[in-house]
Amino acid sequence: MPKEFTVTPWKVEGEVDYTKLIKEFGVQEVNEKLLERIKKHTGELHYMLRRKIFFSHIDLGFILDEYEKGNKFYLYTGRGPSGNTHLGHLVPWMFTKWLQDKFDAELWFQMTDDEKFIFNPELELEETNRLAYENALDVIALGFKRGKTFIFSDVDYGKTLYKQAIRVAKRLTVSTTKAAFGLTDSDSVGKHFFTTVQSVPAFLPSVLKGKNIPCLIPCAIDQSVHFRLTRDIVHKLGYYKPAGLYNVFLPALTGPKGKMSASIAETAVYTTDAPEVVEKKIRKYAFSGGRDTVEEHRKHGGNPDIDVSYQWLRFFEEDDKKLERIHDEYKSGKLLSGELKEILIEKLTVFLKKHQENRERARKVLDSYILKD
Ligand code: TRP
């Protein structure tokens, strides 16, 4: 039987079954017990935890065990700079910012300009490198703490990273990269090698500070494939296995299948889109769970489970009560599809206005966040 969906770090296709992914990727479900445990330290739970947007993890229990013993962890996440930042990218970053605040943790943020150059036949290295620093503005705009947040491009921090990447590479075979990523003999050695570079920040702070520090990686589930390999290898090198906390994808504007693609402009809203553009994209492309006619909609109601405007509000409207009201009114037919779209437009317009102001301000302080060697 053909697979009905595919998730790899470089391709997401079809309607993702997250229950199946948990098994396939060897991760654990985020359950109520774990949420209670987090809440003991944070006081409240972030809405992305309450709503199971962060739905799976590996070894989060270990991170909390260590934290409770006074052994603080650091955060590690990243961005593959292949284009402008879109709203789907912001999802794990917004959550990571909350973790930084609640646990007073350092963030190590990797920008894989090397990866996007290797994997994308159309992109030159100068371009992915330039995009890395454009994307970094979006990271800083979210409010990460200066002095506790270290952002680096693989190319511009290469000397430090390379020394560690080869330690990983020595212990990684091509049969493993084939099995884990579906790479083949015809793929470039660059593709086979790349995962070693993504492994490095999962133990680099331990190397630099000369003591073992636990690492937590919050990111979208597709990246967990890398860290399965990382965990095995860094353990052999004598470091802690990094833990992970993984989110579901923000659905594409045009339908609930797959993740948004930065290369197809209609399926995504970019952080730099002007209000008129956001408005137009949502009115024109947002997949609707509404009925064909107003009469039918009033009578039978809409389907919030497949309606992208509603789904996006789950990712961006923090207020549970407001969200529930919208859900119920849409389902009962009181709220029309067009009205729901306007609620989302309003929410995103306000959010993006602030984000874009912060993003411009970030240009002035960019250098103070960047590591180079
Ligand atoms: N490979 C990731 C991407 O294509 C970028 C990345 C590097 C990353 N290190 C990471 C993402 C750690 C999440 C966590 O987007």
Image (cartoon, rainbow, N blue to C red):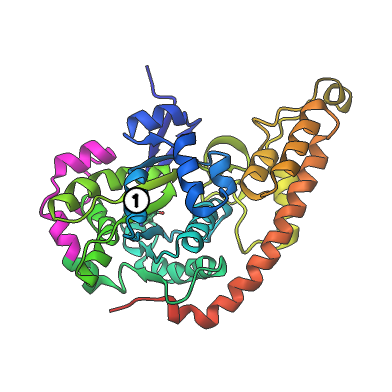
Which quadrant of the figure contains the C terminus?
bottom left
Ligand 1, seen in the image, is in the quarter at bottom left
Quarter of the view holding residue 8: top left
Question: Is 141 placed above or below 296 here?
Answer: below
Looking at the rendered structure, the kind of residue marked 1 is: Ile
Q: How many marks?
A: 1
Quarter of the view holding residue 26: top left
**Farthest-out residue, top:** 1
Q: 53 or 121, which lies in front?
A: 53
Q: Is mark 1 within 8 Å of ligand 1?
A: no
* Residue 55 in sight here: no
Residue at position x 54%, y 83% in the image: 364
Q: Is residue 165 magenta?
A: yes
Q: 4 or 98, which lies in front?
A: 98
Residue 94 x/y as whole percent = 54, 57
Range of magenta residues: 164-189
Residue at position x 40%, y 37% in the image: 7
Q: 148 or 304, which lies in front?
A: 148
Residue 55 x/y as whole percent = 47, 38
* Residue 287 in sight here: yes
125 relative to 183 in the view: left or right: right
Instruction: Identify the secondary structure beneath mark 1.
Output: helix
**Farthest-out residue, left:** 170
Assess disc 1: are there few (<14), some (14-19) or many (≥20) residues with their C-alpha within 10 Å of its C-alpha.
Answer: many
Which quadrant of the figure contains the N terminus?
top left
Q: Is residue 75 magenta?
A: no
Residue at position x 64%, y 39% in the image: 311
96 relative to 142 in the view: left or right: left
Residue 265 x/y as whole percent = 59, 52
Residue that label 1 marks: 63
Residue 244 x/y as whole percent = 36, 47
